[in-house]
Image (cartoon, rainbow, N blue to C red):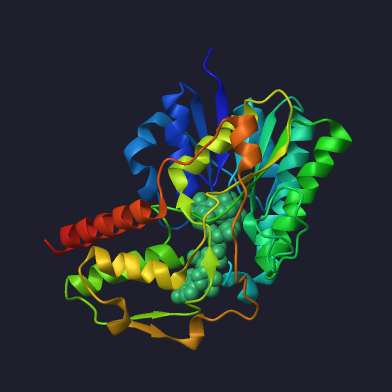
């Protein structure tokens, strides 16, 4: 019998890569999607006929219980969230309802329907925020700097609490930034690779950004979803940092992306204070030793390779739209 996995957030960047991985492993994949007046299945269009898509919302526990009862999974990957940090200041309550309390709703639905289900929680390096240790590891204390980071800290601890209170096989992946050609256009990597491609094709002349000094530990999303799956294959649930161990600034990101199209980034990038944040996370760099030693996980794509791939994908996509 094929194992069945439920993915919340299947229409997102990570959901699409995880669905591909699980299908390749022979799983039956159930993807939870929320009701919308327009269909937004672009990231899963190529695998849609191999997925079972079901309606549900992290804001509505009744829908979560129904999904678990109607399509009983052995593994649940909770990737759904309001995931854009900047928006968490303008919509802090929605962010808390989805990204924090949504985790409790799903864990409690699992406890009610079948406590044997294995659970993955998409925690985040944003929990380290104003970092208290460099590099950040599983034992580094949290100091979140945004309503999103605060909500993720709640999601992390309620996962640990349900594991300790009810014996659930619930694991939390503290994933550092991971990117791909499927990344949303609002996140800085994709904004830069898409912007560089548009400028190179003569469609724009400038790219407006916020803090160029921010440093992130950027990896490739398809590498990171492997770590999620590996966590749920362990006998014992646990928490893991997933990162490359390298950090780069937004400035370096710009240089690499514009180099890839043969342009000087300093002639096109303009700092615009609209993109500065009320409180910033200045530096993130993770220590993936535990994930490497326990899960046997390592990344396959490096930062220059990632940026070049994203610029090439954006260039090809925009050329296709122009035809
Ligand atoms: P993403 O592309 O923004 O996808 C978020 C997904 O959540 C979308 O499928 C979205 O559905 C869904 N969603 C939002 N609100 C929902 C609700 N109320 N009920 C059900 N679904 C809802 O995010 P991602 O980059 O793939 O990240 C996946 C997860 O990992 C998120 O929890 C994120 O916070 C976390 N994370 C990401 C990173 C990273 O660098 N990418 C790092 C650490 C942690 P719609 O398509 O309908 O909007
Ligand atoms: O790409 P970002 O918006 O990602 P951020 O805030 O690090 O969050 C992402 O990674 C987290 C993991 O650490 C996830 F949990 C979260 O869901 C999300 O996927 O911004 C990265 C950095 C920030 O310091 C930001 O201030 O880039 C800086 N930045 C500079 N100019 C910009 C811009 N960010 C965006 N989005 N847009 C700009 O114009």
**Residue 20, x across and y down, in percent:** 42, 34
Identify the residue at horizontal 71%, vertical 43% (top origin): 106
Residue closest to the eye, 45 or 177: 177
Rendered location of residue 248, percent (x, y): 48, 64
Write the residue at 60% across / 72% down.
282
Foreground of the two, 220 or 81: 220
Is residue 9 visible to the viewer in this orientation of the structure? yes
**Above/below status of 282 relative to 291:** below
Quarter of image, res 227: top right
The residue positioned farthest toward the top in the image shown: 1
* Closer to us: 97 or 124: 124
Q: Residue at x 66, y 36 (%)?
A: 66
The extreme right residue here reads 165
Q: Is residue 158 left or right of residue 94?
A: right
**Which image quarter: residue 50?**
top left
So how many labels did they put on this image? Answer: 0
Q: Residue at x 82, y 39 (%)?
A: 162
Tell me if residue 64 comes above or below residue 152 in the rendering. Answer: above
Relative image position of residue 175 (x, y in whole percent):
59, 49
Q: In which quadrant will I find the C terminus?
A: bottom left
Quadrant that contains the N terminus: top right
Task: Give the percent coordinates (x, y) of residue 226.
Answer: 51, 35
Q: Is residue 83 visible?
A: no
Relative to 47, residue 188 above or below: below
């Amino acid at each position: 019998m094929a194992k069945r996995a439920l993915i919340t957030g299947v229409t997102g960047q990570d959901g699409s890569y995880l669905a591909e991985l699980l299908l390749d492993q022979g799983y039956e994949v159930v993807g939870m999607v929320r009701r919308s007046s327009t269909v937004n299945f672009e990231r899963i269009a190529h695998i849609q006929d191999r997925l079972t898509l079901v309606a549900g919302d992290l804001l509505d526990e009744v829908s979560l219980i129904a999904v678990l009862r109607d399509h009983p999974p052995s593994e649940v990957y909770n990737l759904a969230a309001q995931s854009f940090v900047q928006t968490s200041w303008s919509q802090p309550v929605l962010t808390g309802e989805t990204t924090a309390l949504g985790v409790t709703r799903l864990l409690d639905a699992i406890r009610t329907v079948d406590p044997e289900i294995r659970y993955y929680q998409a925690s985040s390096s944003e929990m380290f925020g104003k970092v208290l240790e460099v590099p950040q590891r599983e034992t580094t204390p949290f100091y979140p700097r945004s309503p999103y980071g605060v909500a993720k800290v709640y999601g992390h601890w309620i996962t640990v609490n349900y594991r300790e209170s009810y014996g659930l096989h619930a694991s939390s992946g503290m994933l550092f930034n991971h990117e791909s050609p499927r990344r949303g256009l609002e996140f800085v990597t994709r904004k830069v690779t898409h912007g560089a491609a548009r400028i190179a094709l003569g469609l724009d002349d400038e790219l407006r950004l916020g803090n160029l000094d921010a440093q992130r530990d950027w990896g490739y999303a398809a590498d990171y979803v492997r770590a999620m799956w590996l966590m749920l294959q362990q006998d014992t649930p646990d928490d893991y940092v997933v990162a490359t161990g390298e950090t780069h600034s937004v400035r370096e990101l710009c240089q690499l992306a514009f180099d890839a199209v043969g342009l000087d980034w300093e002639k096109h990038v303009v700092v615009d204070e609209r993109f500065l944040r009320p409180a910033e996370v200045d530096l993130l760099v993770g220590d993936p030793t535990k994930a490497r030693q326990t899960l046997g996980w390592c990344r396959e794509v490096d930062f220059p390779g990632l940026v070049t791939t994203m610029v090439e994908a954006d260039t090809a996509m925009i050329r296709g739209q122009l035809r």
